[in-house]
Image: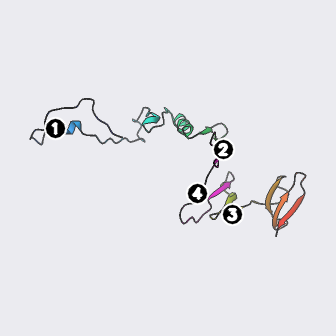
């Protein structure tokens, strides 16, 4: 962030090194702001690199909205809005030398339910036939195979 004074001095620099020179006054200033300090208050506008928010919730909402994203704190839901129908809605790009899953879906305790592996393969959930919902594909504990459970609860083995 560049800060300059409105006043610009046209005087030439003197020779006394102990005095502030006009060129020092006119120069860009380095500004350091400790955002974790309780004394730091105010709103930095979005067009100046800030979030335009006066609270963490407002700041996050403002920042997300600039990216066509909305967050509902009541339901903890992130909504991707708009977009161009000619392009994918979401892209997950692996890091160079990706060694872990690219994406995971976890339960409330952080246990991985299913994932997309580092090479793009789908890792389906491992479930008992009783707990699996209808119209789902999963790895069945009973069948020891990848299965499809149809809308009536019938189980079809897809692969062993």
Frontmost residue, 109 versus 158: 158
Q: Position of residue 74 (x, y in %)?
A: 65, 36
The residue at the far front in this view is 86
Q: Earlier in the sequence, mark 3 or mark 4?
A: 4
Q: Is residue 85 magenta?
A: yes
Q: Earlier in the sequence, mark 1 or mark 4?
A: 1
The quarter of the displayed image where residue 124 is located: bottom right
The answer to whether residue 126 is left or right of residue 58 is: right
Q: Earlier in the sequence, mark 3 or mark 2?
A: 2
The answer to whether residue 130 is left or right of residue 44 is: right
Which mark is nearer the camera, 4 or 2? 2
Query: Looking at the image, is 131 positioned above or below residue 38?
Result: below
The residue at the far top in this view is 7
What is the distance, in whole Å, between disc 4 and disc 2 at their CAs?
A: 20 Å
Q: Residues within 10 Å of mark 1 (few under 14, many from 20)?
A: some
Q: Which residues are magenta?
A: 82-107
The quadrant of the rendering that contains the C terminus is bottom right
**Magenta span: chief secondary structure:** loop
Q: Earlier in the sequence, mark 1 or mark 3?
A: 1
Residue lying at 17% horizontally and 36% vertically, measured from the top left: 22
Frontmost residue, 43 versus 116: 116
Residue beneath disc 2: 85
Q: Residues within 10 Å of mark 4 (few under 14, many from 20)?
A: few
Q: Which mark is residue 93?
A: 4
Query: Looking at the image, is 42 positioned above or below residue 76?
Result: above
Residue beneath disc 3: 121
Residue beneath disc 1: 21
Q: How is the image coloured?
A: rainbow
What is the distance, in whole Å, between disc 1 and disc 4 at their CAs?
A: 52 Å
The quadrant of the rendering that contains the N terminus is top left
The quarter of the displayed image where residue 81 is located: top right
């Amino acid at each position: 962030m560049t800060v300059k004074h409105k006043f610009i001095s046209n005087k030439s620099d003197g020779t006394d090194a102990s005095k502030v020179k006009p060129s020092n006054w006119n120069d860009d200033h380095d500004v350091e702001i400790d955002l974790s300090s309780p004394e730091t208050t105010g709103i930095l506008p979005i067009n100046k690199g800030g979030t335009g928010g006066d609270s963490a919730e407002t700041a996050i909402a403002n920042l997300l909205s600039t990216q066509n994203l909305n967050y509902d704190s009541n339901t903890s839901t992130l909504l991707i809005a708009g977009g161009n129908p000619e392009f994918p809605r979401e892209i997950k790009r692996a890091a160079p030398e990706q060694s872990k899953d690219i994406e995971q879906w976890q339960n409330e305790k952080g246990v991985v339910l299913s994932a997309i592996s580092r090479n793009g393969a789908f890792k389906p959930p491992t479930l008992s036939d009783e707990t699996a919902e209808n119209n789902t594909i999963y790895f069945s504990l009973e069948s020891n195979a990848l299965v499809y459970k149809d809308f009536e609860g019938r189980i079809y083995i897809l692969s062993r």
